[in-house]
Image (spheres, grey):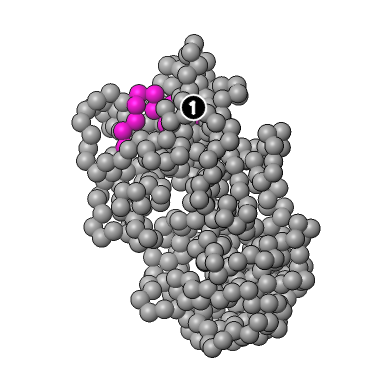
Amino acid sequence: MSILSRERNAEFGGVRGCLRISVTDMAALKVRIRGRHRPNPPDLFYQKLPPEGIALLATIPNADEVLTLSIPGDDSWRGGWPFTANPPEFTTGLVVIYRLQPDCRYVAVAIRDGGNEYTLEEFIKIAVGRARDTFGNIEIIPGRYVYAVPDKEEWGSILRDYGYVALNPENFRELHQTPVLPLDESKQYGHVIRIRAPLYSGDKLSARSPLPVFSRVEVLRDGDTESRRLNFEEYKKERDGLAVIPGAIADCFGEWLLRLTKESGFDKWRFRPGMAFGDRTEWWGPRGRRRTVHEGLDFVEGFIGGEARLVPEGVPARAIAPGEVAAVLDDYMGKTVVVRHPSMTQPDGNVFHTLVSHIQTEGTMPPFVNKGEMLGRIGKRAGIHIRPHLHLTGAWFPADFPFAEAGINTIMHPGFTTAILADLNHLIRTNPLCVISPDDREFLIDG
């Protein structure tokens, strides 16, 4: 398999991925601490790549939408190259320059090559030709793989970037087929995923030494053998096939939404980019890219006689279907009520749960709730800049999953492999009370 055996310039189809510093590396650089951004962070970061880094930049994948890829720092399991807030002194190799964006993320804006500086788009075209001239076609080295067990942040990044990772082969002189398991939530709660990524070299290199490239992972799940490994597309297809909405939830949703609409005083709901399941953008503030893909639906605004309004605080948040209250958890805006629906199970024993978030609860929650029973009211904690709204998630979990022990930041993370999040978008696309807006040029809220 050759990466550079086909034209990879943007004008021949597809969109080049953009580069940014990952959340993990931002934490290591102390510009993001415990989910918050450091005041007055540096305007620029620099990342020095060796001369063979030309192959890494040449293999940034094309995609139908922009990927937010990252080249890891040197403390990653993938190996990597260090970041610095000071411009490196002139040496051989390449320097990636990252600039702070309005959404407090660092995005690559330029590549420095000797005394010249290029935009990322310009340099990718140069890198494709130079890599081919220097290394030839970049092909898999048969039988050479990197194995790892990513934590949920790493796996979330891999999912977001359609299975692509950047590897520094200098980190993989000793390759092991059984990686050391990290102390990650997926291991703690009994569901581990292993990945392997092939190493590549140029066909002009007689020694076939590995090159740093963007490589796509293969997946081995709990109990899988080498013969059962899945390529990334197969894994996604199989997992997406499990992320179904139970018919009973689909049947109850219309009634639940009609009541929510009336109690909000709306005629219809409006869903902007960033409010639906799987969206990658924020619907608030500078409309930056989310740290992870959206886990559910956000009910934020609706229409009253053709005029857009915000959902009022105090509107009741109700149970969609009868079930057991599995947990009441703190989230960053308020509370999340987790309702288990024991009658909705899959052959592997997983049970469907609905999670109603960003609400204010009142008193002690009963152990069982009926369909339509009030769980709390729409509202938020003081000091939160995001407008009050109701968040709804549907997911499959093991019947005995310890929600209180795991916490909201684990169970709602798309990279947490124990949970299978359900795509709820079909419920709003087919409901006459919902309007799907393709853009936010008339957006009601400014943050």
> Residue at left 46%, top 43%?
69
Taking the image as drawn, is residue 64 in sight?
A: no
Compare residues 130 and 341 and report the one nearer the observer: 341
Relative to 9, is 99 above or below? below
> Residue at left 53%, top 83%?
361
- Compared across the picture, whether 149 is left or right of 167 comes to right
Where residue 245 sits, quadrant-wise, is: bottom right
If the image is split into quadrants, where does the C terminus sit?
A: bottom left
Compare residues 196 and 308 and report the one nearer the observer: 196
Relative to 116, is 223 above or below? below
- Compared across the picture, whether 269 is left or right of 57 comes to right
Secondary structure beneath label 1: loop
Residue with the mark numbered 1: 174
Compare residues 195 and 186 and report the one nearer the observer: 186
- Residue 12 on image: x %, y %: 53, 32
Where residue 113 sits, quadrant-wise, is: top left
Q: Residue furthest top?
A: 206
- Residue 122 on image: x %, y %: 37, 33
- Compared across the picture, whether 241 is left or right of 334 comes to right
Q: Residue furthest bottom?
A: 363
* Amino acid type, label 1: Glu
Magenta span of residues = 47-59
- Residue 82 on image: x %, y %: 32, 38
> Residue at left 41%, top 71%?
386
Relative to 373, is 299 above or below? above
